[in-house]
């Protein structure tokens, strides 16, 4: 079912002590608000088990920021979906533009990661989005459509329904430059249409599509007010409980 979701992506920030402290702060703050959305924090692998021990899973979901494209074995330095799930985490961000850009992730590897995440009962938060040049030359619709088709359209409708999508224009990530609420609505509606074409209107209507890219307390309300924007994937503003909660309470 379509849900509103605000998810933090901590990226490569916080030591273990800092991360556990931040998770405790968010968990505590959630006790005092009636959140109108699901709230999730996606944290570094090293923090997962410790963070899981200090949060109330009924109020705050926990996820990883990536997982391996293999289930186990001789892949030094990798962390598999079953390993993530064994920490108590139930979400995993996949296909973030920083993974695509700096670590060479392709639709082929992402397809495997999505399958393995689903097999471990993790909810993938699957990221798509264009770079500035593609925004400016107008190819962004094709780019985003291809990202979805290549990595996700081999899934059954049942499995596709387990995903959360996150539209993150690369030009808006960490730049302070946000897509306008109208720009976000335009592409979110397009994405929902692409899903509807393949899986039908019901599946499309039930898919949560989050916006990511310099989402802050000051712009979250306008973004979330758009009919096809179902929440946010938050980077920088998720690193302080106060600003993260300012986005959570925008719903
Ligand atoms: P910022 O919110 O820091 O722009 O990052 C967005 C993002 O990449 C979330 O995954």
Image (cartoon, rainbow, N blue to C red):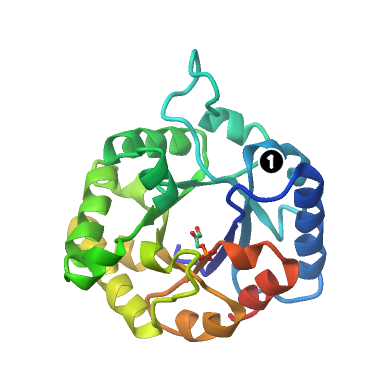
As drawn, 242 above or below 106: below
Tell me, yes or no, if residue 201 can be seen here. no
| Crowd rating for badge 1 (residues with CA inside 10 Å; few <14, some 14–19, many 20+) | many
Residue occupying the point 58% across, 84% down: 218
* Relative side of 25 to 40, left or right: right
Label 1: which residue?
48
In this orientation, which residue lies closer to the viewer: 43 or 158?
43
Residue located 51% across and 34% down the image = 120
- Identify the residue at horizontal 52%, vertical 32% (top origin): 81
- Residue 84 sits above or below residue 40 on the image: above
Location of the C terminus by quadrant is: bottom right
Q: In this orientation, does residue 124 appear? A: yes
Residue 134 at x, y percent in the picture: 22, 64
Q: Quadrant of residue 208?
A: bottom left
* Residue 37 figure quarter: bottom right
Q: In which quarter of the image is the N terminus?
A: bottom left
Indicate left or right for 110 with 12 as reference: left
Where is residue 126 drawn, in percent x and y?
41, 51
User: Which quadrant of the figure has residue 180?
Assistant: bottom left
Residue 156 image point, x, y percent: 29, 43
Secondary structure at badge 1 equals: helix
Q: Position of residue 17 (x, y in %)?
A: 82, 46
Of residue 120 and residue 74, the one placed in the foreground of this image is: 74
The residue at 40%/63% (across/down) is 168
């Amino acid at each position: 079912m379509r849900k509103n979701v605000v998810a933090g992506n901590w990226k490569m920030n916080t030591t273990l002590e800092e991360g556990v402290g931040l998770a405790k702060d968010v968990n505590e703050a959630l006790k005092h608000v009636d959140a109108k959305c699901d709230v999730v924090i996606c944290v570094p692998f090293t923090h997962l088990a410790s963070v899981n021990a200090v949060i109330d899973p009924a109020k705050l979901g926990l996820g990883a920021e990536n997982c391996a494209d293999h289930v186990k074995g001789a892949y030094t330095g990798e962390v598999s979906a079953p390993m993530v799930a064994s920490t108590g985490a139930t979400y995993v961000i996949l296909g973030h533009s920083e993974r695509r850009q700096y670590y060479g992730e392709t639709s082929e590897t992402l397809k495997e990661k999505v399958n393995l995440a689903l097999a471990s009962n993790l909810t993938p938060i699957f990221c798509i989005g264009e770079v500035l040049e593609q925004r400016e030359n107008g190819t962004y619709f094709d780019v985003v459509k291809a990202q979805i088709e290549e990595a996700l359209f081999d899934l059954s409708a049942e499995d596709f329904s387990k995903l959360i999508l996150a539209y993150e224009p690369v030009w808006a990530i960490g730049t302070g430059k946000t897509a306008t609420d109208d720009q976000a609505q335009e592409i979110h509606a397009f994405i929902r249409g692409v899903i509807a074409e393949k899986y039908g209107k019901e599946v499309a209507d039930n898919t949560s599509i989050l916006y990511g890219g310099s989402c802050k307390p000051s712009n979250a309300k306008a973004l979330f007010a758009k009919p096809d924007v179902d929440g946010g994937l938050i980077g920088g503003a998720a690193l302080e409980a106060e600003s993260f909660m300012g986005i959570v309470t925008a719903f």
